[in-house]
Amino acid sequence: MPDEVLVEHAGGVTVVTINRPAARNAVNRAVTDGIAAALEEFEARKDLTVAILTGTGGTFCSGMDLKAFVAGEDVTHPERGFAGITLRPPHKPVIAAVEGYALAGGCEIALACDLIVAAEDARFGIPEVKRGLVAGAGGLIRLPRRVPHGVAMRLALTGETVTAAQAERYSLVTELTAPGKALDGARALAAAIAANAPLAVAATKRVLDGQADWTSAEAFDRQAEILRPVITSADAREGATAFAEKRPPVWRGE
């Protein structure tokens, strides 16, 4: 794992931290590769249920490292895309813990996450048009799915930023915290998710993500395909048994 990305695992939760504070956590190739590797491990391990993605130094991520871009450095992963997440996010839930700026590619990283916990003084935006670029790492696709269409149009076409309070009002931000406490808030939310059965959590995310593309006629059949392995799992039996025995369940991810 490169020094540009820090990773820790505890209590069913993976925390992935972009560690380029001097560059406001701008994404270069090392960051992309580090996040991709961390998420590959996160997805592969049965003992990990939810991940948190954050940044050091009071900034989430300022976007693509423009110096690396001008130098011809490829900052996209061949399978997972920009920053190792925007093209193919994990099948397990990911929480963005945002302090300071989540701009351009940084905002697109946050949009690739399922939930966003932000400090009250954080700001979000996709200002690519101000640099002769386009928010092509998911910003133009995911933002209109998270906020009203007119809001997405304004942000994308003007390059303006919004405060965390505005982002919460638009339903982009899940939860607000005091400045400096976004990671604490994300850890608390992650702990609440990690207390649940891993297979059930992952399947629930798949249904929530996929159902927008399903017709009404096929929705329940498509859902059944995803839920069948969960219902017949050892964890499902453990959950029922633990409830009957009035004890906390012990999940195995099986």
Image (cartoon, helix red, strand yellow):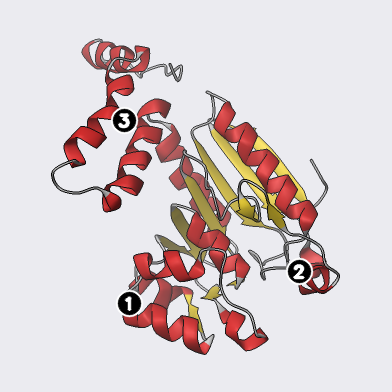
* Mark 1 neighbour density, 10 Å: few (under 14) some (14–19) many (20 or more): few
Q: Earlier in the sequence, mark 1 or mark 2?
A: 2
Left or right: residue 40 versus residue 190 is right
What's the residue at 66%, 69% (across, down)?
63
Nearer to us in this view, 115 or 76: 76
Q: Amino acid at mark 1?
A: His
Residue 184 image point, x, y percent? 54, 51
Front residue of 21/34: it is 34
- Residue 211 x, y percent position in the rendering: 27, 47
Q: CA distance from mark 1 to mark 2?
A: 29 Å
Give the residue displayed 21% in from the left and 12% down from the top: 244
The image quadrant where one finds the C terminus is top left
- Other residues around mark 2 within 10 Å, as few (<14) / some (14–19) / many (≥20): many
**Residue 190 position (above or below residue 73):** above
The residue indicated by pointer 3 is 226
In this view, the mark in front (2 or 3): 3
- The local secondary structure at tag 3 comes to helix
Residue shown at 52% from the left, 47% from the top: 89
In this view, 41 is above or below 207: above
> At which x and y percent is residue 43?
55, 33
First in residue order: circle 1 vs circle 3: 1
Residue tagged by mark 1?
149
The residue that appears at 63% across and 80% down in the rendered structure is 133
Residue 76, located in which quarter of the rendered image?
bottom right
**Residue 50 visible at all:** yes
Q: Residue furthest right?
A: 71
Q: Is residue 108 above or below residue 95?
A: below
Query: Which of the two discs, 2 and 3, labels the residue nearer the N terminus?
Result: 2
Tag shown at residue 65: 2
Q: Amino acid at mark 3?
A: Ile
